[in-house]
Image: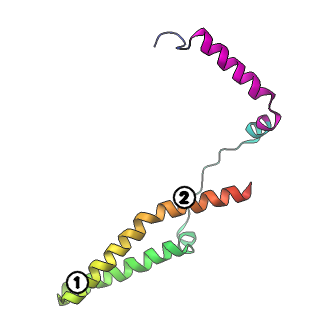
């Protein structure tokens, strides 16, 4: 693109919008005091306090135990138990990031 890329009409409209926003005291105060702090990564202790994360860890341990038992015994019941446990573990693992994101958003809204 050569030049500014905005037509004269668009520049006037943008200037009007900026003027209206400058007159909004509450917005101005929020923008001046806004801090962009990086979210700290949760440590292992904090992750294990969350019920779904703890459930996922327990399911993974049970799944590993059943995998070892299924390879040693080759019983159909143990193999089926491993498959079911693995599928449940996979389902919990796929849903976990969305749940964590939603609960974090709820906490941020409560702080306001």
User: Label 1 crowding class (10 Å Cα cut-off): few <14, some 14-19, many 20+?
Assistant: some
* Residue 102 location (% of width, % of height): 56, 59
Residue 37 shows which numbered tag?
Answer: none
Position of residue 97 in the picture relative to residue 87 (left or right): right
Position of residue 77 in the picture relative to residue 21 (left or right): left
Position of residue 87 in the picture relative to residue 39 (left or right): left
Q: Is residue 95 above or below residue 54?
A: above
Question: Of 17 and 65, which appears nearest the observer?
Answer: 17
Q: Is residue 42 magenta?
A: no
Which residue sits at x=81%, y=27%? 23
Q: How is the image coloured?
A: rainbow
* Residue 64 location (% of width, % of height): 32, 80
* Quarter holding residue 69: bottom left
* Circle 2 residue: 101
Specify the quadrant that holds the C terminus: bottom right
Q: Is residue 78 above or below residue 24?
A: below
Residue 79 shows which numbered tag?
Answer: 1
Q: Is residue 11 magenta?
A: yes
Q: Secondary structure at mark 2?
A: helix
Which residue sits at x=38%, y=76%? 60
Q: Main secondary structure of the magenta part?
A: helix
Task: Give whichever of discs 1 and 2 has the lower sequence position.
Answer: 1
- Give the residues in magenta: 7-28
Which residue sits at x=55%, y=72%? 50
Position of residue 59 in the picture relative to residue 15 (left or right): left
* Residue 107 location (% of width, % of height): 66, 61
């Amino acid at each position: 693109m050569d030049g500014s890329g905005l037509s004269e009409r668009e520049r006037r409209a943008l200037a009007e919008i900026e003027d209206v926003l400058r007159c909004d005291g509450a917005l101005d105060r929020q923008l001046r005091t806004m801090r962009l702090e990086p979210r700290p990564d949760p440590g292992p202790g904090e992750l294990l306090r969350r019920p779904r994360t703890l459930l996922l860890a327990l399911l993974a341990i049970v799944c590993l135990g059943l995998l070892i038992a299924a390879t040693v015994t080759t019983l159909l019941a143990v193999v089926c138990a491993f498959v079911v446990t693995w599928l449940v573990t996979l389902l919990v693992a796929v849903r976990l990031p969305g749940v964590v994101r939603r609960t974090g958003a709820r906490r941020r809204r409560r702080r306001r």
